[in-house]
Image (cartoon, helix red, strand yellow):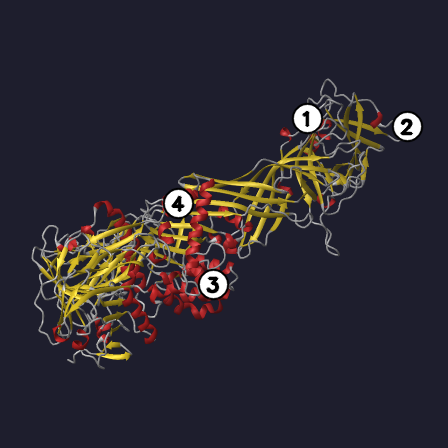
Amino acid sequence: MTAPAFVRVADGLYELSSDADSPVAGYWAGYRAKGDLPDPATLDDVWRDAGGAYVFCTAKPAAYPPFLAGVDQVLAQLPYTRFVWIADPDGDPAYWQLWNLTATSTGSGPAIVWTVRQGASFGCGGYAVTVPRGTALTRATAGVALAAASFDGPDGTVYHTAPGSAGIPFSGPAVGCLTGTLTLEHADPDDMARLDVGLRYSMPDPNDPSHAAVLAVPMPLLAQDGRALTVYLSFDPLFPLVPDRSALGFFAPDPPDAPDPPDLPALRSRLATTLGAEVTLAPVPGTPPQWPARLVFATSPRVVDAPSDPHVYLTPDGAFRLAVEAEGSTRLSLGLSGLEYVDVGDGVIALFQSGHPAYLPGTGDAALEPLGTTAYVALLPDTAADLTYYAQPWQSPLYARADDTEFLRFHEMPAATLGDFADGDPPVVPLGAYLGVDPALAPYAATIEQAALAPVRRANLPVRDAAKGPTGEDTALAVTPNGLLARLSADGTAWRQAVLAGLPGAPVDELVLTAVGPRLQALLQSTEAFAVVSDVTEFFRQSSVRYRVDEVVRALLLARGVPAPVVQAVADAAGPDTYDTEEAFTAQVAVAAGAYLDTLLSVAGLLKAVLQDWTFQLSPRSWRTGGEGRTVLLVKFASRSLTDLAADLPAWGWPEAAYDEHGDPRPTQELVLGVIEDARERAGVDPGGPYARFLREVADNPAWNGVLVLGAPVAVAELPRELQFVTAGIDTGRFYAHHVGFGVTPFERTADGGITLGQTAAFGLISYDDPADLYVEPGQLDFAFKTQQLSARFANAALADFSARVELMTNRLFGSLLTKRAPESGNNLVLLGSYQRQNDRPSYAFTLAGGADFAAGNAVLLGVEVLGVQVQTATGSIDAGTLAVDFVLTGNLRFAELPHADLFSYGPNAALPPPGTPAFDGYLRFGNLVVTMAFPAADPGAQTFTTAYDRMAFDPANSEARVQSLTRGFPVRVTGAVANPVPDPPGGPRGRTPEDLGYTGVLSPVDAVLLSPPWFGLVFTLDLGTLGALAGSAGMHATLLVGWSPGTRDERPVYFGLRLSGADATTATWPLQGVLKLGFRGFELTTYEEGGRREYLMRLRHLALSVFAFSFPPGDLDVLVFGDPEGRSSAVGWYGAYDSGTQAKAARRRLAAGRRLALPEENGFQA
């Protein structure tokens, strides 16, 4: 080897020819000569140069003249400097960071002697290399030897270098470093403890109110077994944290051709196997690309976000041979759970690598940041065989049937294969040496493990390439304690399917992820498994779901507008089979589906949870991918709460699944955190509500584990039949489940060794809110419908709470525009929905919130007061593509009081009451006024309404008639309604009129008109008694029709008609015996006043018996029908008046002006 020399680069400045031996790129070493030295100058030349100085720099100076001037300035300020280390040679010399060692000389030439003038200490944290005053310096073969030096530990222990070992070499990797040999021989505490050797992680101190302090968790790693160790010190004041420059090596830095070093004793470690067996680490020199074992400096911060003045400690670096002392325990535990380990039975090299991040920030994109550093480890096979890494969540380990027992036993699952350098640099992962942690710090150590170390290990280790494939009969079954069922490959080493939930009795009894790929398998086998899945494409790269075409799918396709021939072709192509993967399903139906394939995939997926007739379509092709309520699937089998994990991106075990179109998971994170924060705000308003329950039991509960879907699609067309009508008033773009989740699933073994899942503890919340009242401009729509609020909470796979609020806008009834007298909620009937359980099934009911009193803009109908609304079961069917619901109204009608004859009878008096007297409020109680709403399932907003007036029923007994009304003065009772509410179309056919229904107009004191559509009428019934033996005692009944058309206050289109039961509608005659008939030729209603009371008489004009064309008696015979003037009987009296035609006309009297009629004491007439 060529001896080092110094080459002149400037006047008086020389560069060391071997400075490139330093492993630090750009490192520079040289000499500032005092005297005139040759070029090149030898080591002896510079040794004899009294007043000169050896110079070591972090980098080669950019320009030598200014650098030389700076060196001279330093030497002038620091006399007797013999060695100087400069950190920034191109900086301002006034601010150079430097270290120096002074020495004085005696003699000259070959006889020169150098002695340290002033002791120097070169520190790194609590460690230091000290050269005492008076130490003799001697010329060494390739450097300068120090007669004495020491290495000072952080606890004050001083380790003196072995005689003749200390020095500053001028060649080799340690060029410019302080070197020496130390002996570690202390017993209690041993030198590993004295030197603070271990791993160290840190985090913000949660107990510091200022949030500035750092809490460190030291993890002592190594311990001696009582035997002394020799270590080789190398320390560079310029690079104390660079392992190749500053370290305590276990092996001497021998030249490449040196013989193999002897084996060193193994060190006890604080690592352990899953069964607690002790693990040792023996330093080995390593075979390149490995490197020899050593201890190097690492840092741990003292203050948050402040890298200056860190705590410094020693951590292992390089190759150690890992061995287990106890036989039969070869699983090296890597974490806290005991379910993450590596099989080290065939020998392992633990290659430690220092300088890796060790500070847990709690926020940001990295689980660990380099504010603090420590050593990670790569586990390498010490033989030809690869190592197997096993991992499962401790919250969800797999158990499978043992071959020789009916019991389940723990089932190992390989998660990765660890090889050597053949395929590139091996993965390096952080470890925790938990056996050495102070018990007081154990909770914080657990936090660091769960939040950082476990996720980083999983992220750094390779994903095991377990090929996706269908599940056939050659599968193994395994199950977790909380009921997650795994269908595995036949050898039990790879996932094929993951059964997330069991729903016995539901149309789909299992929620299954099929074709589990390597990335998803790696997630499910993480010790802290947490993932957020929003990218449908990434999901299908790593998994799939089942598909099937059944009757429900066919109906849904038709409802979405898919042509019937296409639906049939799809059904024929798919058949009754269930397809395990989307790939297989698409291959079978793509041609038949054509352009409707996406629609088919959105409805045919079987990742569908049906909870008591509420269907949540969770198949990814059905997910909401934009706008409000984007669907996100969360998988959690981890120790921390979902809230904490969502805020910690590095904890997301499958980050690609949450990427947006730009490859960024942060928008998805913001969405998840926004959902949680929104729930928190709502819980603040309602601490006992469903959002508070969601936070308490799921989001903020570290103990909850399972699968959660946020923004879960609700299959609107598959709601319970009693509730399908609410979809007509829903903004379907905003209707979804806040969340649906699946927790613990019970299971049991079957006789044939299978595993049967019970009912999963499924839960969920639908919370739809659109509080604005329904409104349209008057006259635009007669009716409209809106759902303002719907809330459904599910627990244990059953409906637990339900409430709803819907509005039925009612702008027109009986042809009249309505105006609600109370302005709240506009012209809407507000219905509140609730449920109760009957035979363990939910039953839904809607009731009117309060009443609704409407004023009618009509001359006859004054108002409609709705007292109740009943919502009847849908009369439509999704199979027909149309849904329908009946709103059945009950309430009161109020009519105007007509002068001279109060035909409508019910309503307020026209005249104002005397002062101090309350106004009379009459009304007619009605029921069964049916308003039917129909809409196509494919377009719920396309609502149509019809009103069935002829189905109305009335309750006279609970009605209030006016005193002067027809019903008070005449024995009639209202029994129904009839109407033709549809106007005649222009130029179209004429609509039905009262005459078409058999009514004959009645002459009355009221101005009546013939009605044309639209018109409405009340039907009154009058019992006229019987015709006696001639008609077989058949009863005679008259039906009175009091009708009206929409009009104004000044124009009252009123109709009064009569229809006789059993009579010919055109001739008003009854058949009696054979050809003998009885008939009338006209009808008249008259009134008279007596004692302030109005009485009503019905005149049946021109009564006659007829046989063929002959009638008798001759003359005129009128019959007057009257009621009991005292109101004591509902029977009628008949009074006949005969005019033979022979009396003088002047003698005739009008009965309407005559005296009051009275029933005789004896019943001498037909009543």
Q: Quadrant of the N terminus?
A: bottom left
Residue under numbered circle 3: 599
Q: CA distance from mark 2 to mark 3?
A: 91 Å
Element on which disc 3 rests: helix
Residue under numbered circle 4: 695
Q: Position of residue 103 (x, y in %)?
A: 19, 66
Residue reaching furthest top?
1161
Q: Residue type at mark 2: give it.
A: Gln
Q: CA distance from mark 1 to mark 4?
A: 68 Å
Nearest to viewer (mark 1 / mark 2): 1
Q: CA distance from mark 1 to mark 2?
A: 36 Å
Nearest to viewer (mark 3 / mark 1): 3
Nearest to viewer (mark 4 / mark 3): 4
Q: Residues within 10 Å of mark 1 (few under 14, many from 20)?
A: some
Confirm whether residue 754 shows in the render. Answer: yes
Tag of residue 1100: none
Q: Position of residue 825 (x, y in %)?
A: 61, 41
Tag of residue 1130: 1
**In front of the other: 293 or 655:** 293
Q: Which of the marked residues, 1 or 2, is nearer the chain's N terminus?
A: 1
Q: Residues within 10 Å of mark 4 (few under 14, many from 20)?
A: some
